[in-house]
Amino acid sequence: MKKILSLLQVSLLVLFLLTSCKAPSRQKVLATLSLEGVDTGWTITDRMLTSSKIVPRITFRVKNKSTEAISKGSLYFTVTFRLVGDRQAFDSNWSPYPPEDIFPGAMSAPLNILSLHGYKGSSPDSYLKNKAQWQKMEAEVFVRMRGSAFYSLGTWPIAQKIDGWTETPAPASPAPEDALPAKTESAPEERPAS
């Protein structure tokens, strides 16, 4: 009888462990978190004397929409960078996350994921001057939560801007003389009598 009870206890323990360790479904993952403050662009990664390299990047924060904390390291993000209209990846990169617990209703620190590949040019200005020739890119973000499959959280276009760099404005062309305001005669100054 004792053997039957101990076997029953072990069986119940195994059953409990199997059901409690089940990977979350897509619905559970999407109900648990959302991406907030998504920002995209290009980042300078290698700046040399005569050239620089820019790579696409996506930055976001994770919001915990559930009633339980998202524990440190329980999320795994991967981002696929691709040319718009092309299903084949240009590049992908990943990041385990978060570095600290995210409590219910709270948001994480920003997570910045860069592509490993990009474009080389003579300077950031050279990229901005040739903006019309940039190929349009997008980033698709996937998440894995506590052993789940990878689920897509969405796709965002990569903005055509370089972090920390603004376009140099073209020099202003001088206005024609007839566009200048007309000279006005000013009244002679009054001088005190000496």
Image (cartoon, helix red, strand yellow):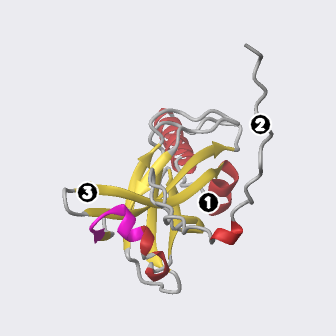
Question: Relative to residue 119, is residue 193 drawn left or right?
Answer: right
User: Which residue is under mark 2?
Assistant: 188
In percent of the image, x 51 and y 63: which residue is there?
142
User: Which residue is under mark 3?
Assistant: 46
Q: Earlier in the sequence, mark 3 or mark 2?
A: 3
- Please provide percent x and percent y for residue 91: 36, 71
In percent of the image, x 70 and y 42: which residue is there?
66
Task: Tell me the SS state at disc 3.
Answer: strand
Question: Relative to residue 37, is residue 44 drawn left or right?
Answer: left
Q: How many marks?
A: 3
Instruction: Choose mark 3 or mark 2, whichever is in front.
Output: 2
Looking at the picture, which amino acid does disc 2 mark?
A: Pro
- Please provide percent x and percent y for residue 20: 57, 45
Whether residue 124 is in magenta: the answer is yes
Q: Quadrant of the C terminus?
A: top right
| Label 2 crowd (10 A; few <14 / some 14-19 / many >=20) | few
Q: Earlier in the sequence, mark 1 or mark 2?
A: 1
User: Which residue is under mark 1?
Assistant: 25
Question: Relative to residue 190, is residue 118 drawn left or right?
Answer: left
Instruction: Choose mark 1 or mark 3, whichever is in front.
Output: 3
Instruction: Choose mark 1 or mark 2, whichever is in front.
Output: 2
Q: Nearer the viewer, residue 95 or 31?
A: 95
Task: Tell me the SS state at disc 2.
Answer: loop
| Label 1 crowd (10 A; few <14 / some 14-19 / many >=20) | few
